[in-house]
Amino acid sequence: AQSVTQPDIHITVSEGASLELRCNYSYGATPYLFWYVQSPGQGLQLLLKYFSGDTLVQGIKGFEAEFKRSQSSFNLRKPSVHWSDAAEYFCAVGGYNTDKLIFGTGTRLQVFP
Amino acid sequence: NAGVTQTPKFRILKIGQSMTLQCAQDMNHNYMYWYRQDPGMGLKLIYYSVGAGITDKGEVPNGYNVSRSTTEDFPLRLELAAPSQTSVYFCASSYGQGGGTTDTQYFGPGTRLTVL
């Protein structure tokens, strides 16, 4: 079955610290992978996406993610977190043979000054 | 561009009432989607459309209906509201040229619905 797992429901970091949000997927074909961010009371905004090629992808707001096929993972990273990064982050998977994305349950990031 | 707009922002319904959630996009996108978001559950796809006149069910379609008569609009209809439909509803759209999931989905701000 196709699925996305975000094992961390809630993460708290200090401002300036590094961040890694985990995402594991199960998909029967070549996956297309996405990270979206949702600020409080807002809709979702795309951070970055991976289809093929270089397994390290850069996104907006200084985020990056690395695709590891052997681990079925697509973890999101940021070297230094800012207070404005506090939000909920969603990983999603799709593919060339589908019109639908499957979303994970999200990770809520809290940033302390 | 206004992007994806949704109305209303908030609504309280009584059990058994009906309502339509409106969604419009001005980006000339082919694909449109309706999701619901429940705490701890992520987003679940209700219905989607790949073009005017074409709709298909998502993961959780029961209790909802949609239509797509124009490229711009994709309303979601709740016929007999139930407490289980209390949720935040998001509409999204994407260009869809390369297949629905290759293009970025743009989300509206959401509609918070409570059914009492």
Image (spheres, helix red, strand yellow):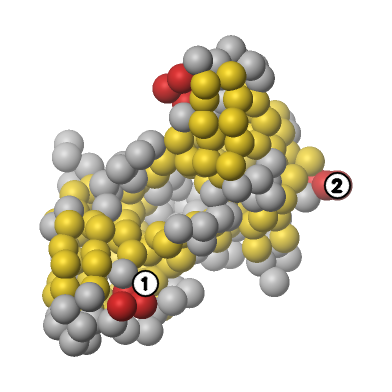
Q: CA distance from mark 1 to mark 2?
A: 33 Å
Name the kind of residue labelled 2 in the image. Ser
Nearer to us in this view, A71 or B88? B88
Q: Is residue A63 above or below residue B14?
A: above
Residue B6 visible in image:
yes
Name the kind of residue labelled 1 in the image. Tyr
- Check disc 2 and report the residue beneath it: A70
Label 2 CA crowd tier, 10 Å (few <14, some 14–19, many 20+): few
- Check disc 1 and report the residue beneath it: B47
Q: Secondary structure at mark 2?
A: helix
Nearer to us in this view, B41 or B94? B41
Q: Residue at x 40, y 54 (%)?
A: B96
Residue B55 visible in image:
no
Q: Residue at x 43, y 76 (%)?
A: B60
Q: Chain of mark 2?
A: A
Nearer to us in this view, A49 or B17? B17
Q: Secondary structure at mark 1?
A: strand
